[in-house]
Image: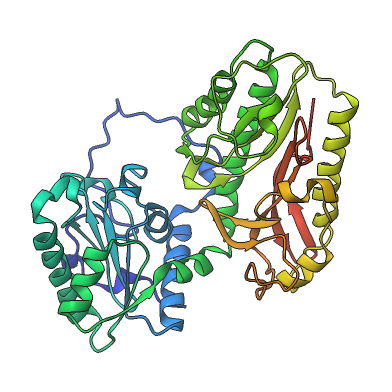
């Protein structure tokens, strides 16, 4: 394992005490906080160092001198810092430099340096140099050149002779400034981050449990409130409310639909009024407490009684999930799973979900196992399932041209003996 970066001297830090140092932010008696779910069970510093070491080990394994992360989810994983995550998904105003055998330097949005004050993974915080057109206007190229010089200085000071840099998300202007002005080899950091994120620690699993718990509270509230005459968006709002009031963060999609809008799948939540006896299907895609995702799909029926056609669809989707559960254990290859997996009825196949299995962590993660074509060329089936991966099993069943469809999905931990269900043991439909 790469050692934690606490060996770097304190004078490298502009912001933030190390583990065990006293935080200097005033703790007023008026600043009282409600405890987050399972907060007493999670060792945050242990989790932070586990995740940072997972990233550094991937860099070391692949002979990468340093990585630069812009994706807010990757930054959160590597450092456990967050700031305006959704905003920073479309404006590159925040990033982190991680030297494989050196410091972690966070480049923060202006006047936000205090946010990472007590985060043990950060050795230094600086104000970000940005070059997006929103904040730079006609100075895009000039600012990007300044950014590339900062990166060059960091590489010279902390990486020495290694010229390999991994970057996850960056526009052509920034990449070109590095390539045209300095002699660096640029690699895709997303590959290394996905592999790092795929194996979960015990602390991460507790964080995920908290998120799932909150999502299931929201699901139960939606089930209770579902009535004919309300809109899809009114029903959907109960999940959002439950997430936010329990320290959750955001919901990645708008996948709730009713009646004919459940077939085909991927019709976003709308102001359609739910009618009596209609199916209502949804996918939570919820980033909850601690930044972990609860990805659960359920299909309810208004009035709580399925008709015969609805029951047939639901039974097929249920069988799909339960069958595929039995195949997965450590050492099973993705190709072996794909060959053995449950087969959709012919009249439903062209409506199938894009994947049968996907990883889950702070968002949907690697692996992504598709429904294979004849020569298995439409996906990467080369990997294997490993212990302490967390995954979701997906099912969507709806006849091509049919009236309605059913969406189900559960979340699991891969253990030595097979799958452990993390969501409630329910694929409820009423």
Q: Nearer the viewer, residue 201 or 92?
A: 92
Furthest-front residue in this view: 401
Q: Nearer the viewer, residue 93 or 387?
A: 93
Residue 70 versus residue 258 in the image, above or below: below
Q: How is the image coloured?
A: rainbow
Residue beneath the point at 74% across and 74% down: 331
Q: Is residue 52 left or right of residue 111?
A: right
Q: Give the x, y percent position of residue 376.
A: 70, 71
Q: Nearer the viewer, residue 387 or 90?
A: 90
Q: Is residue 166 left or right of residue 380?
A: left
Q: Is residue 360 left or right of residue 45?
A: right
Residue beneath the point at 41% across and 77% down: 59
Image quadrant assignment for residue 257: top right
Furthest-bottom residue in this view: 161
Residue 54 visible in the picture:
no
Image quadrant assignment for residue 397: top right
Residue beneath the point at 62% across and 71% down: 380
Residue 176 visible in the picture:
yes
Quadrant the C terminus occupies: top right
- How many labels sit on residues? 0
Q: Is residue 348 left or right of residue 267?
A: right
Image quadrant assignment for residue 53: bottom left
Q: Give the x, y percent position of residue 370.
A: 68, 60
Q: Give the x, y percent position of residue 115.
A: 26, 46
Q: Give the x, y percent position of residue 18.
A: 30, 60
Furthest-right residue in this view: 308
């Amino acid at each position: 394992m790469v050692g934690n970066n606490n060996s770097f001297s304190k004078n490298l830090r502009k912001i933030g005490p190390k583990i065990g140092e006293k935080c200097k932010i005033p703790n007023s008696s008026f600043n009282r906080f409600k405890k987050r779910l399972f907060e007493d069970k999670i060792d945050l510093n242990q989790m932070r160092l586990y995740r940072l070491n997972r990233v550094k080990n991937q860099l070391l394994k692949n002979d990468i001198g340093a990585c630069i992360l812009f994706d807010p989810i990757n930054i959160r994983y590597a450092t456990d810092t967050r700031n305006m995550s959704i905003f920073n998904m479309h404006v590159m105003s925040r990033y982190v430099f991680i030297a494989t055998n050196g410091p972690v330097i966070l480049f923060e949005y202006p006047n936000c340096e205090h946010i990472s004050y007590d985060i043990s993974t950060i050795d230094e915080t600086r104000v970000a140099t940005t070059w997006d057109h929103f904040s730079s206007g006609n100075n895009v190229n000039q600012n990007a050149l300044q950014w590339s010089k900062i990166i060059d200085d960091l590489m010279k000071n902390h990486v020495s002779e290694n010229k390999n840099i991994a970057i996850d998300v960056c526009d052509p202007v920034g990449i070109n400034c590095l390539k045209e002005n300095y002699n660096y080899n640029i690699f895709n950091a997303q590959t290394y981050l996905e592999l790092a994120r795929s194996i979960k620690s015990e602390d991460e699993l507790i964080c995920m449990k908290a998120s799932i718990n909150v999502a299931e509270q929201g699901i139960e509230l939606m089930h209770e409130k579902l009535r004919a005459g309300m809109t899809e968006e009114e029903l959907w709002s109960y999940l959002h409310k439950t997430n936010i009031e329990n320290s959750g963060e955001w919901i990645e999609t708008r996948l709730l639909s009713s009646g004919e809008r459940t077939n085909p799948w991927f019709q976003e939540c709308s102001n359609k009024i739910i009618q009596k006896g209609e199916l209502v299907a949804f996918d939570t895609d919820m980033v909850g407490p601690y930044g972990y995702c609860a990805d659960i799909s359920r299909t309810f029926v208004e009035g709580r009684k399925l008709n015969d056609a609805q029951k047939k669809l639901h039974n097929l989707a249920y069988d799909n999930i339960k069958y595929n559960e039995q195949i997965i254990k450590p050492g099973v290859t993705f190709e072996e799973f794909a060959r053995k997996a449950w087969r959709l009825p012919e009249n439903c196949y062209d409506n199938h979900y894009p994947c049968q299995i996907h990883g889950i962590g702070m968002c949907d993660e690697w692996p992504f196992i598709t429904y294979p074509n004849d020569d298995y060329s439409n996906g990467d089936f080369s990997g294997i399932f490993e212990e302490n991966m967390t995954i979701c099993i997906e099912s969507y069943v709806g006849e091509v041209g049919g009236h309605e469809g059913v969406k189900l999905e559960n979340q699991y931990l891969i253990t030595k003996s097979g799958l452990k269900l993390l969501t409630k043991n329910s694929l409820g439909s009423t």
